[in-house]
Image: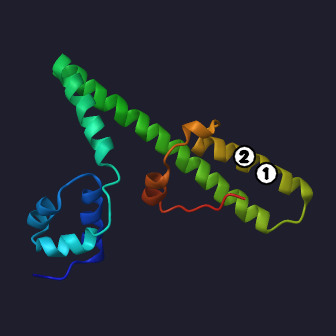
């Protein structure tokens, strides 16, 4: 068996976190179950419950009609795209504000930075702490990282 590349390891871990069994992963990636076990040792599938919940919802909608199910998928995808767009824009704005802040000593620029940072935090995390949006996927997809100041 060939050595696993970093990319393949990442894919295996992603699928494991979505709830795929170690045996399924071993078969799919043509590696020994021991290799998968070693890679996933001590980990708990992060999103298994969410995948099960979404699957249950989609099954329920599909029982109504196939058309409703297709509309449901389109609407969820559309809302997800909008959310990612707003998160990405807010993160890019924050990066630019941080760059400008590094170049200035003017108190007005510092105040503007603070206001912009607050707005960007609200855009990405929500105004209410109970409605925090998981942002890790959009950060990874857009290769963005931001330090909130």
In-front residue for pair 74/136? 136
Which residue is disc 1 drawn over?
114
Mark 2 neighbour class, 10 Å CA radius: few under 14, some 14 to 19, many 20 or more = some
Q: Residue furthest top?
A: 64
Q: Do the residues bearing badges 2 and 1 touch, measured as CB atoms within 8 Å?
A: yes
61, above or below 125, in the image = above
CA gap, disc 2 and disc 1: 6 Å
In-front residue for pair 124/34? 34
Quadrant assignment, res 28: bottom left
Q: Is residue 22 left or right of residue 11?
A: left
| Residue at (8% x, 64% y) in the render | 27
Q: Is residue 5 left or right of residue 123?
A: left
88, above or below 122, in the image = below
84, above or below 105, in the image = above
Which residue is disc 2 drawn over?
118
- Quarter of the picture containing the C terminus is bottom right
| Residue at (28% x, 64% y) in the render | 13
In-front residue for pair 35/147? 35
Quadrant assignment, res 132: top right
* Marking on residue 16: none
Q: Mark 2: which secondary structure?
A: helix
Q: Residue furthest front?
A: 42
Q: Is residue 131 left or right of residue 31?
A: right
Q: Is residue 74 left or right of residue 96?
A: left
Can residue 65 be seen?
A: no
- Quarter of the picture containing the N terminus is bottom left
């Amino acid at each position: 068996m060939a050595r696993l590349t970093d990319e393949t390891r990442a894919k295996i871990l992603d699928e494991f976190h979505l709830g795929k069994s170690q045996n399924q992963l071993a078969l799919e990636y043509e590696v020994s179950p021991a290799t998968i076990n070693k890679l996933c040792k001590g980990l708990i599938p992060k999103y298994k419950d969410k995948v099960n919940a979404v699957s249950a919802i989609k099954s329920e909608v599909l029982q109504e009609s196939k058309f409703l199910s297709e509309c449901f998928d389109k609407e969820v995808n559309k809302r997800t795209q909008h959310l990612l767009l707003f998160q990405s824009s807010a993160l890019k704005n924050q990066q630019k504000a941080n760059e400008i802040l590094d170049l200035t000593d003017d108190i007005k620029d510092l105040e503007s930075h603070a206001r912009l940072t607050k707005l960007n935090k609200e855009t990405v995390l929500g105004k209410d702490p109970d409605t925090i949006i998981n942002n890790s996927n959009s950060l990874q997809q857009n290769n963005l990282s931001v330090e909130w100041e």
